[in-house]
Image (tube, rainbow, N blue to C red):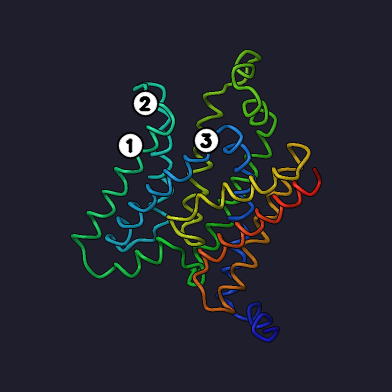
Amino acid sequence: MMALISEVFQYEFMQKALLVGVLIALSSAVLGIFLVLRKMSMIGDGLAHVSFATVAIALLLNQSPLFISIPVVMVASFFILKLNDAARVHGDAAIGLVSSFSVAVGVLISSVSTGFNIDLFSYLFGSILVIRSSEVYLSLFLAAVVIGTVIFFYHDLFAITQDEAFSRVIGIKTKRMNYLISALTAITISLGIRVVGTMLISSMIIFPTVTALQVARSFKETIFLSAFVSVVAVVLGVIGSYVFNLPSGATIVMINAMLFGVFFLIRKWRR
């Protein structure tokens, strides 16, 4: 067992998998608290369904899914906000409309095309062990953008998370911040396609935050603890998937679930 674990850090493809996985873990954890506390976490699930359609389009055009997913998913996130504002289609209804339409597009493309069904399956449930060098560099850059933006606008994001109406009164441009959160979520979802797949990526945003909320005593402590939990889940998931020959995406999500159970028991024990 120890020999297998030591092998993980010797192979280049495993090094790439761990690097990209940690980057996505940090991005999703930093962003997750703003989505979960504002009850916007399901937008991640909706955008994940949009990314399914973009993957199908990218494979049809023989292009890297990241280069198509990022702009399309970002536009979809803005469209969801527009539905909320202009069409009076609120919350989960707007997300449901966009996500169901996107899944239908992806299924139609995959049904009329041949030759990439296996590739599409790998993007559905994650294929972190076959990451290319270009995807590593792009993930590094975009993860830095997500984390850096959250740090720069931290006080405004914190304010609208606590009380959006009061934030608007004191002069914070809440609509602009909402679009910013949506854009960062779109980037994180697109990056996470390779890590856990389009069907599981929303768990990377939700699980670490709700796990940290079980024991954290402050907003910042929640962010740091969420990042720690997310990184631990990814590292153990990647190593576990290699050692036991399991799907990497599902393994990461299962470890996240187990960590949530542990932190939940800790909270009960404290009480």
Left or right: 258 as drawn, with respect to 218: left
Residue 243 spot, x, y in % from top left: 59, 79
In this figure, which residue is indicated by the disc labeled 1? 97
- Where is 110 relative to 41, above or below? below
The circle drawn on residue 136 is none
Please, what is the three-letter code of the amino acid marked with disc 2?
Answer: Val
Circles 2 and 1, Cβ within 8 Å, touching? The answer is yes
- The quarter of the image holding the C terminus is top right
**Dot 2 corresponds to which residue?**
89
Q: Is residue 268 above or below residue 84?
A: below
Give the number of callouts.
3
Badge 1 marks a residue whose secondary structure is helix
Disc 1 residue type (three-letter): Leu
Left-right relation of 200 to 32: left
In the image, farthest residue toward the bottom: 3
Q: Nearer the viewer, residue 202 or 86?
A: 202
User: What is the x, y in percent for residue 29?
Assistant: 63, 48
Q: At label 3, which amino acid type do we have?
A: Met
Q: CA distance from mark 3 to mark 2?
A: 15 Å
Q: Residue furthest top?
A: 169
Q: Position of residue 47 (x, y in %)?
A: 42, 44
Residue at image location 57% in from the left, 63% down from the top: 252
- Badge 3 vs badge 2, beta-carbon distance below 8 Å: no
**Quarter occupied by residue 164:** top right
Q: Which residue is mark 3?
A: 40
Mark 1: give few (<14), some (14-19) or many (20+) Cα within 10 Å.
Answer: some
Above or below, 128 against 72 in this view is below
